[in-house]
């Protein structure tokens, strides 16, 4: 039975990846931080088969301990401070967790692996935020990185550290440059979930409107359930490498609002939107659109869920949740 250790187990991707690995017969361990993590029950209910170990990416001794207990064949480093807007206000913490945390876990894996650098296969959750200011369209593995936030800079550090551990020590370390991926499990701070929840509440008469930031930014949005499969596929290859994972289609925040409101039969949605500088960013990533041709040819990976289906799935899910809330 293969063994896996996942950091970021309480997050959107941690849950989907756990389900995927459990279904494949893995013995799955998840790193959970804090002495009383509020998402502990969610993890226990959603993926009861996962064995939880306490630890934090900023504490290398906890990572070494977790590795010694889990004895993993594969490590998926999904843990991060992942909300871009938050990273300006907490730049040093973001650097410690999202950046230096990668070095901590790579070093812990290297020490744990002893004489055999490929004993553990390592996945790093890199991000399209590393592309930042547009240098090339669409963005691919070779595109120049120009991050535009403390989060993006921290991810670039983690990305190059992963490449360096592969090249310096011969580790089987791969990096997935994943474009935005969403689902009904997405955190409420991210724009897709903020919109799907608000649209559901508006249609049920529980909310009057939505306060938004920049409506012109464009993102390449895919479904998280599809994207965790790409993570797994990367670690099944003989040779570690870096891959862009994306749909190749981009949409603006306006498109997102249009499709979400359409799902509940509201066409004159613009009257329900106000914009507030509070939700604008000091520097914006204007356009993301990825070219995942390499993932298609090497991994045989392709996204299955498109933008409209994704947004409808999220709105439908929030309608159900909000109806339950309303009936309470
Ligand atoms: P989430 O924000 O949903 O989850 C982040 C996870 O990181 C949580 O489980 C959180 O745990 C954990 N975490 C936070 N701080 C620490 C720490 N100090 N030590 C250990 N774990 C910590 O993110 P997603 O699931 O959406 O994303 C997974 C990864 O992929 C992240 O690294 C993200 O940056 C990256 N990524 C995501 C994309 C997306 O569109 N979703 C696109 C590209 C990359 P806790 O519950 O304790 O806070
Ligand atoms: P992003 O996701 O920054 O791309 O990072 P987010 O959903 O937060 O923002 C997407 C775009 O929407 C614009 N926007 C708003 N965003 C939020 N959150 N709230 C608003 O009210 C709002 N109004 C407009 C933003 O300006 C931005 O342009 C996500 C995270 O999952 C990262 O961890 C990951 O690395 C990248 O995706 C790829």
Image: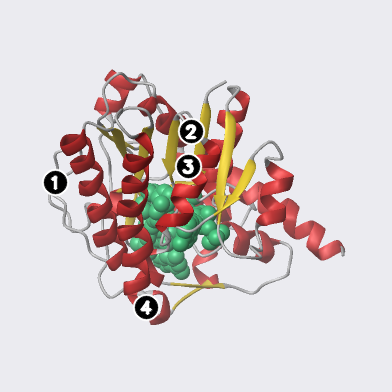
Taking the spot 33% from the left edge, 52% from the top edge, the residue there is 102
Q: Local crowd at mark 3 within 10 Å, few (<14), some, or many (≥20)?
A: many
Q: Counting other residues with Cα less than 10 Å from the Cα at mark 2, is it few (<14), some (14-19), or many (20 or more)? A: many
Callout 1 secondary element: loop
Q: Are marks 2 and 3 in contact (CB under 8 Å)?
A: yes
Q: Is residue 54 left or right of residue 57?
A: right
Image position of 163 with respect to 149: above or below: above
Give the residue at mark 1: 136
Q: Is residue 33 above or below residue 144?
A: below
Q: Does the CB distance between marks 4 and 1 fall below 8 Å?
A: no
**Which part of the image, by quadrant, shows the N terminus?**
top right
Q: Earlier in the sequence, mark 2 or mark 3?
A: 3
Residue bearing mark 2? 72
Q: Nearer the viewer, residue 34 or 191?
A: 34
Q: Which mark is residue 86?
A: none
Badge 1 vs badge 2, beta-carbon distance below 8 Å: no
Q: What number is the disc on residue 67?
A: 3
């Amino acid at each position: 039975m293969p063994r896996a250790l996942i950091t970021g187990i309480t997050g959107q991707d941690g849950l989907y990846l756990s389900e995927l690995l459990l279904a494949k017969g893995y013995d799955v361990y998840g790193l959970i931080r804090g002495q009383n993590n509020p998402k502990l029950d969610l993890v226990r209910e959603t993926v009861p088969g996962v064995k939880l170990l306490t630890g934090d990416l900023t504490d290398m001794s906890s990572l070494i301990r977790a590795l010694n207990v889990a004895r993993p064949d594969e490590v998926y480093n999904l843990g991060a401070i992942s909300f871009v807007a938050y990273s300006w206000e907490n730049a040093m913490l973001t650097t410690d967790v999202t950046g230096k945390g990668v070095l901590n876990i790579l070093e812990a894996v290297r020490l744990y692996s002893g004489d055999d650098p490929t004993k553990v296969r390592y996945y790093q959750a890199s991000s399209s935020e590393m592309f930042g200011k547009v240098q090339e369209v669409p963005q691919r593995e070779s595109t120049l990185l120009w991050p535009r936030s403390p989060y993006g800079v921290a991810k670039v550090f983690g990305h190059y550290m992963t490449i360096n551990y592969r090249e310096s020590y011969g580790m089987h370390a791969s990096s997935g440059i994943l474009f935005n991926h969403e689902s009904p499990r997405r955190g409420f701070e991210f724009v897709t979930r903020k919109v799907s929840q608000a649209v559901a509440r508006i249609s049920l008469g529980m909310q009057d409107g939505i306060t938004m930031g920049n409506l012109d930014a464009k993102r390449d949005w895919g479904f998280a359930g599809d994207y965790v499969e790409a993570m797994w596929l990367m670690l099944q290859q003989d040779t570690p490498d870096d891959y862009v994972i994306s749909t190749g289609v981009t949409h603006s925040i306006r498109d997102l609002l249009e499709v979400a409101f359409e799902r509940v039969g509201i066409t004159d949605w613009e009257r329900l939107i106000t914009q507030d500088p509070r939700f604008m960013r000091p520097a914006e990533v204007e356009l993301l659109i990825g070219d995942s041709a390499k993932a298609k040819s090497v991994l045989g990976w392709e996204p299955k869920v498109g933008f409209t289906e994704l947004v409808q799935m999220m709105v439908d899910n929030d309608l159900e949740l909000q109806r339950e809330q309303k009936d309470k």
